[in-house]
Structures are given as C-alpha cells and as structure tokens.
Image (cartoon, grey):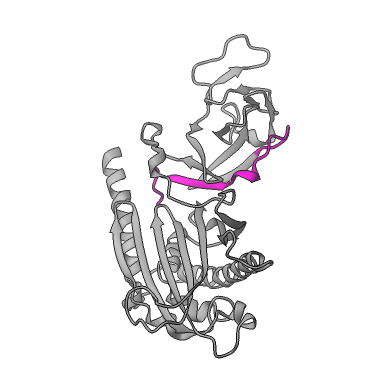
Amino acid sequence: MFLRNAWYCAGWSDGLSQGANALLVRRIAGESIVLYRKPSGEVVALEDRCRHRQAPLSLGRKEGDALRCMYHGWKFGPDGMCIEVPGQPRVVQQAFVRSFPVIEKNDWIWVWMGDPALASEELICHSVGPNHPEWDLRTAHIEVNTNYRLEIANLTDLSHVAWVHQDTFGGTTAYSAIRAKQTVTARGLNQEFWVRGVPAPTFAKHLFPEEARFDLHFNVTFTVPCNFILHFRVFTAGKAADGPSDGQLLLDTFSSQAVTPRDGESVDYYYSWGAQRGTTAPGLIELLIESNHAAFLEDKRILEGQFQRMKELPDYRMCDYHQDSGPAKMLWVLDKLLKEEAENVA
C-alpha cells in the first residue's frame, strides 16, 4: 500500500520547537512516530512505542539528546538504542526502537520510512520554503479522511477546478478543456498547461473590472508518495494561442504541497502559497492562503464523500475519460515503484 523507500513530510519546521515538552506525534504510512529536537536543534524521529510494553514514547520526556519512557523509565538514545533501564544494571541488546532518517529541507521535516542505507537527500522533492528570501509565503495544514491515492488523482487532474472550486479558484469552465503537456519521470510526473482568456478566479474577481481577462500558466511537478509543487503565473490576456502568453505578467506565485498518508483512510496535507517579494500588494498573500484553505475544504468535502461511497461499493465499475491521463500516469509510477520494492524485499 505504501512506498517505504521514500521521504514523507512530517510537517513544517516551525511546528517543532526546542521546548522541554515539545514532542511531535505523527502517523506516517501506518506507523506511529515521535519527533523531537536535540539541544543542538537536530531533529530525531523514533518509533513511538517503548520496547518494554509499547507505551507511547510521546508521553515521555526529553533528557538531553535522549527520550525517557514515563511508564517504567526506560531511556532511549537518538539512535533508538535503550541506554538505561532503572533498577537493572544491564540493558539487553534487543532493547531498541526504530530510528528513522530525518532531514529538514526548505522548512519542511522529512522522514525516510524505508531502508536507511537508501535515504538519499537528492530524493526529496524540490520546493520553496516560507523562509526563502525571494518569496513571501504562508503555510497551513489540513486533515482529510481519504486514501492518498484519491488525493493523487485529484491533484493530477485540475479540470475539477471548474466544478469543485467554482466559489474559490474557479469562475470559468475553461479548466474542463485542459490539454496538459505531461512528462513521466522516474519518481513522478510533470504537467504544464495554459488556461487563456479567462476571468479572474472567483476569490479575486472583486479586484478587477468585470470585463478583465487573463492567461494562467501552470507548471506542476508531482513526486511520490504525493507531493505537488506548483509554479503558477497570471498574465493579462494576450493574443497568443499557443506557447507562452504575450500578455503582461501580473503575478508570479509558488505553492509547495505535501500529502502524507497517515494510514489507508486519512492524510495530513501540508501546503503553502505566496508570491515573489516586491510583486504583491498589501494583504494579497493573506488572500491567497485564505482562498487556498477554503478551496482545500472544498476538496475535503468531495474526497471524503467519494471515499465513503467507494468503501460502500469497492467493486463498482467506474468509467474513465480523457482527463484521467494524469492520474493514470502518476499512479502507474507509484505502482511500478511499489512492485520493484516488493520484488527487492522478496
């Protein structure tokens, strides 16, 4: 169900402080993980269960670089090895919990769920973090009770913007006619497309004359398990029917989105949106992230309803159409990697 040899997002870096009681619990790909910072600031990710009686280590306390279980006092180092058992001078070799490779990059915390020997930083998706000096970005988080494969299908088919997001990102049915240039990569998919001569999105219509028209450019990179990195630009409507718009660039934005499956029925969705510094007006970035959050609540409503119906009739025969090419390609990449991983384990 889940790709093990992949980096999974555990949230934004600013969500984990140096506080004495700052223990962050995450459920990632079916496993419970506790994260904390050493006094040096380095992040540690451990299996969130004591080796003794499976009490959550997240109910314990930090002691220097280590974490002590507050059930019977067993103490574990950042490598997962038990280093103290109160009342017993000798610690048995088997007294350890799993330690996960963890990296902070572009203000996200990434956890590697598979073979530590394969945990290459190069496999972390490209993104732009909120502390990047050239961008003014805001971050947010939402929880969705759905399977992450449905999130993949949703994000790789943006024709749904016309319908699901008619009150936020939509305002035109032109999204139904998207013809994206799609490039399959070793661990994902790139999509690029234009939506031309359309009115402002619903959330921004009040900022422009009713007759105003725009060209919208989307460049999206998807990577496993479910990362969505969007470079989105807005131009005044030009005359070009193909290739880049010959209109004037009005807004240059960037959104980094990571969908982390907790299990087969729920996900954590971490995302940002903003624009290049010096190219926005006061309050615009706040409008972008407010609208983004409202739109993702629209997605949440659809995806949770869809997932419920699919659980009711798992063998229901569904029909495909041409906009399903993006989901099909991205899920093909994921399933190919899952198969290769299973064969290597076998």
Residue 345 position, x and y percent, is: 30, 38
Residue 342 position, x and y percent, is: 30, 44
> Closer to the camera, 109 or 52?
109
Q: Specify the quadrant of the image occupied by residue 270.
A: bottom right
Residue 134 placement, left or right of 151: right
Q: Please indicate, yes or no, whether residue 55 appears anywhere in the rendered image.
A: no
Residue 37 position, x and y percent, is: 62, 33
| Residue reaching furthest to the top | 89
Residue 181 placement, left or right of 311: left
> Closer to the camera, 278 or 305?
278
Q: Please indicate, yes or no, whether residue 338 appears anywhere in the rendered image.
A: yes
Residue at figure coordinates x 55%, y 53% from the top left: 134
Picture quarter with the C terminus? top left
| Vertical side of 309 occupied by 143: above or below | above
Q: Main secondary structure of the magenta part?
A: loop
For the image shown, how many numbered marks are present on the structure?
0
Residue at figure coordinates x 33%, y 49% from the top left: 338
Is 343 magenta? The answer is no
Residue at figure coordinates x 55%, y 90% from the top left: 211
Residue at figure coordinates x 58%, y 31% from the top left: 42
| Vertical side of 97 occupied by 179: above or below | below
> Closer to the camera, 74 or 13?
13
Is 16 magenta? The answer is yes
| Vertical side of 257 occupied by 309: above or below | below
- In the image, which residues are magenta? 1-23
